[in-house]
Amino acid sequence: MKALLLAGAVGLGTLCLGADPASNDKALEQHAGAQRLLSEATRRLTDQQDANRKARAAIRNLRNVVGQQESVLQSIENPALPHAWRPAVQQSVSAVVLNLTFREGRPLPDGRKLPAWAAIARDSDGRPALKIEVDAATKEQTKGINNLVFGLPADRVAGKRLVCRAMVKAEGVEKPASATSGGKFVVHYRCGGKSRWPGASIGCGTFDWKPVRFEVDVPDGVSGVFLAFGLQGTTGVIYFRDVKVEAMAED
Amino acid sequence: MRPVWLCLGVLLSAATACADDYRLDAQGFIRDWLVGGPYPSYWVGGAPRGFPDDFLAALGGEANAEPRDGFSQEVEFVADKAKLIAGIGSTNEWGYTATKRVHAVWKALHSEQARVSLGESFGPFKEHIAAYALCYVVSTDRKRIRVRVGSDDDHKLFLNGVRIGSVNAAQDDMADKFVYEANLQPGLNRLMLKVVNRTQGFGYCVALTDMRNAPLRDVTIRLEAPRRKPAAQNQSRPSMPVDREKLEAQTRAIHAQIASQEQALATARAEAARLAGETEGLDRRRAELYRAIEAAYAARRAKLASNPRPVDDPVAPAQVARCRRCLNGDQWLMGVGDSAMEKDEGRTPPDPKSMTPGVLPMIGMNEYFRTWYYPVALRDAKNPYGKLRPHPGWEQYTFNPLLCAKRLWMRTQVELAARTAADACTLVCEHLNGSLHAYFNGQYCGQFSGNIGLVEIPLKAARPGNNTLELFVAAPVELISQFRDTWGIQGDVYLETASPVNVASATVRTSWRNGTLASTTELENRSPNAAKVRLEQYCVLDGRVRYRLPAQQTRLAAGTRMALENSGLWLEARTWGIGGAYGPPVLYQLVSDLYADGRLVDRRVTPFGFREFWVAGSDFYLNGKRIILQGDVGFESKTAGLANRRSCEVIFALLRADGINTIRSHDSDYWSPAFLRLCDQVGMLAYVQMYPILHEKRPLGNFTTGKQSYLSYDEWLKHPLHQRNLENYARWVKMLGNHPSVAIASTDNEIFTQAWDTLEKLDFNLRNDRLGAFYERYVKSLEPSLVMTRDGDEGTWGRKGKWQEDPPCDTANYHYPDFTIEEFVANWPTVYGFRPAVFGETLYHSYGAWDDWIGAVSVQVHKKALKVRQVASRYRSEAVPAQIYMGLVLDGFIRFDASGEGNPWHITESMHNACLNRGTPIAAVPGYPWARVPWPSLSGPGLKLPATRIDVKRSGIHAINWFDAGRPTHVRNEVNDAYRDSLLPQPPLALPSDAECLVELGPAGKGRVVRISALDSLGGRLEQVADNAGTAWFDLPRPGRFRVECDARVVEVQIAGRGARSTRPGFAEIPRVTLSPDRETQP
């Protein structure tokens, strides 16, 4: 068989082993045809699901608009009523999407191993924190990218406002050359073919524990949402703890 | 296991179509190609890797590859988390979290158009991809040809294995943008084009012509070479053993998967139907609620009653001293001043012999801008500050270097009658940017410093006969230490005379919802004695008194000013609207009659409109009806912009016909109230803007040195320039009063921009944003009824995403949401926290800086029209409350082509190029791209630059004819139609309600004062100093009967309103009154 295979491999025409070449071809064609059909079916389904997601978002929006209009109408008919036009829809925290508690000697909360430049260590206040330490050699080796990235569930955060919080401390974080580098605490998502990186300003240098916080409205139709934090394009030590992402919901 | 061998070549036999011969189209474009893709173009280091990467290396390289129809290659779209996600901001790919493997398949493609669009060819891969297009050009002989290429974006072109051209840049696929010369061999010539898409559109076009640019007629196109290379031909299937049973099992599994997908699809479709039903119901409810809201507003208003009741009385005539003399014109002498004078309240003017004639108003400017405003050229094109040379065709024109002087003395003679000299004389300037010290007969009278608002300086030491008025004007450059393009006295200059006890100003505020009319009236007593005064105020329409406010009495001490507040409920007032369902732009006159010690001493007439514009929920309402603002912010022309009433009259009417109901005056535009007066009259809404000064020195140049290079928020609030901002804003708000056209006011522009909005600058940006919010709230506190916005405060292009100020501004303003429709347009009420969304700039204009200055070539116009239809119709379907386009006036009204039919002057592309590149004159427009403006007089209101730029390769505003009576106003293009079809139709503009006339005295009348008095009972007097040609050009507040007099000559004339002639170009139809010693005529 080996000889025959080799013979085939060197191009001895349509030699086959115990099979009708025509039926083999037919099987291949049927397989390819099925794949095409599957691809087409997947595309149709995905398109429909996309359209439905947009429609659901539009309906949420319309419900809010209608609610706001009803509020406007009431305030015209009864000016004594307090104006409730903005926001018509109150938002409250509905779900904690990500809550990272770092424990000494353990892997990351999602089970991943820590990279060499990160560790979970007890700080001088006795509480554990994620420590990211980057020296010049590490920066060179990692091309300056020393962020930890955690995926957020796109289906739970699409169309929501996220509140991202963390406690941060820094020691000797060098001022980066690039404006987009430095201490990072950001959300990344893509929508409509564009990447977005909303985040908090962390600053550089040395500072004690301080809270950082930012809010981001994640549009409907995002493809992948991530929280990233750490150092980028710089050296120094940065600590994180109590990293939390909450999704706001409409009451 | 039953291994089988795939028969080589079996599956490609369907490619017979590829052996066909195809023809070029009539213009020589290749319409048939073998296209392969997508291939990944990683974005690395600010450049697309797809350009250098050779994806066809396995086929001998992209220069030599001969793939066939159906050939496929597995390619990877790598999603390396470390690079794509953690490497924040370093790459920009397809959004996958795991590497995708897809097949780049080669397929025959016939394009119905010359431009081959690939935007939808590769499924979800639309950006950051590369593709190849291959064909074989069959030639009967050897020949030299031109290959004409357009590509969006980068491209490489190979002919017979040789690279004949490449461009590594983001660009549009404009036909013939790149022309490569090459040799065709007899027989087959392999032509391989590689195109890389960065973002946005993806496509290309290739045409073949001979060396005289005629399309090739003797070649055909094939999509495959006739000689098949056995090993390479079967490129679509691997030559490897296959387990048929396994294959069949896999096929069955796939079918099961398909069935499952179909079931899921059926479920999804059922949900879609349900969602559609719910959407329809909500849309219906929304529409009902809009109707209910409008009805509720009307019902609430119907419960109110007027108090005092309206009246219908004649206006009592009045004989008062009030008179306004326009000092615009060429009777001024000017000389350069020096910096010592800025602090000098004494008068140290230059030697009169060194002063030369000058014209007011004028645009003082940085030398850099000389060629922008005047028909002059640079001797050295690389040195914008260097010496000038005459522009071809303008050899007789001499540029006045005083226009670039940062300090100027100006002097003119003012002749006053004995009675007038005893009145209160005031210097008024409607627009001054910089500082001004005023002297009358050598005595210092006062100063002004700022960049907006009326300048009002009481003049002292007036005497009968000749008086000398001297002005020292300085540019604001030293004060602000920032680059300023223009300065000086750019608005009209008046000498206002009135009784010493007079009405200094009257401001009207109206509320449609409450039915109220409120006035704030400033009374002034410049006499040495206190006066007991009575103020009677009433509203006049069509010469009849319609409503009277309660009379007020008070005592006005000598040398003081006092403000009186008055109000009434007036439900019957006719509202000011933009036409159609909103009603016409009715303008009342508030007449303020002031009696001192029982005698009528002053009558001030203040036009106003009764209207209210407000925010309710996420929408705007005008007089109880919801309104969507469809605006334009494209007045980029320096010579035909908002400073020029004539051009505005023509342009506004054209814009309205295509759906524009709002004009946004950008901060760099004109700030005179003249623009607002026109909007008031014709029913155009105005969206006005003024930036604050935020820095003492330019902050960004030293930004990298740290935060200390700018003053903090708190430090700034103690800085003198902050005080200057407050004064400017207070004057601005006062200026906006009485103008019903003002719908939205903006206090800043794009504090967060792509260039500035980085994390490193976040503190700096937040500081600026807080200050922007501070000034917005300050303006709002001065006039709570103003609807405020802050242009681009919603994080234009940046990462900010949400407003910072608390409480937020009335409106959410986002610039260029057309780049991010799904994020910032879809469901906008939710996105912007249930405030009205204002897209303060959108659809950036398409023939200029961002588009390689290509001009309104047909393909670009067509693409822009498609984009307008796509975006504007989306705004319409989403009911976005305010859309300000950048703009119809730039992208419409022009075509740049060989026909010359795309502009009123019939200037063709070749004429334009020959004129600008080789100096070949254009007979129809000597001096092109400048056209002489045939001003009928240098006197009268408005800036009067000698020429206007009509560069037909620039933008539409340059091709709108407002000055040449012998030519049409405009030509339309596809973009005009796109706007007209996509926007909500708007009612036509009203015709201006005022009048004008030209009084001709003859050359002997040079410098004489012409007076026009209204002979109706409302009265009023205007004066004008005749220019050196002896003409005096008057803007009159209304048509009617007037007395025209100069010296001892008097004539009474009937002067018609501007009417429809205001929308026609030129000045020939202005009514003329000849008033010379030997002849007096009337229009």
Image (tube, rainbow, N blue to C red):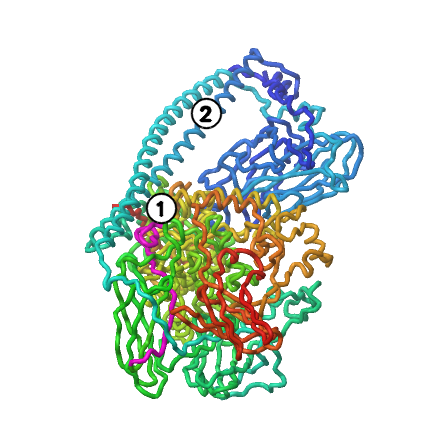
- What percent of the width, then of the height, locates residue B794? 40, 55
Label 1, secondary structure: give it: loop
**Residue nearest the viewer, comparing B815 with B288:** B288
Q: Is residue A104 visible?
A: no
Q: Which residue is mark 2?
A: A38
Q: Amino acid at mark 2?
A: Leu
Q: Nearer the viewer, residue A136 or B1069?
A: B1069
Asked if residue B658 is among those painted magenta in the image, a careful observer would answer no
The residue lying at 56 percent from left, 71 percent from top is B1080
The answer, for residue B47, to whether it is visible in the render is: yes
Answer left or right for B431 relative to B802.
right
Residue B301: give x, y in percent of width and height.
25, 54
Q: CA distance from mark 1 to mark 2?
A: 38 Å
Magenta stretch mostly in which secondary structure? strand
Residue B333 horizontal/vertical position (percent)? 58, 80
Where does the magenta region start and end?
B598-626
Q: How many marks?
A: 2
Q: Quadrant of the N terminus of chain A?
A: top right
Q: Residues within 10 Å of mark 2 (few under 14, many from 20)?
A: many
Pointers 1 and 2 in contact (CB under 8 A)?
Answer: no
- Image location (x, y in percent) of residue B66: 67, 30
Q: Tell me where residue B517 sits by quadrant.
A: bottom left
Q: Who comes first in sequence, dot 1 or dot 2?
A: 2
What's the residue type where badge 1 is placed?
Answer: Leu
The quarter holding residue B281 reads top left
Farthest-out residue, right: B142
Position of B227 compared to A33: left or right?
right
| Residue linked to disc 1 | A108
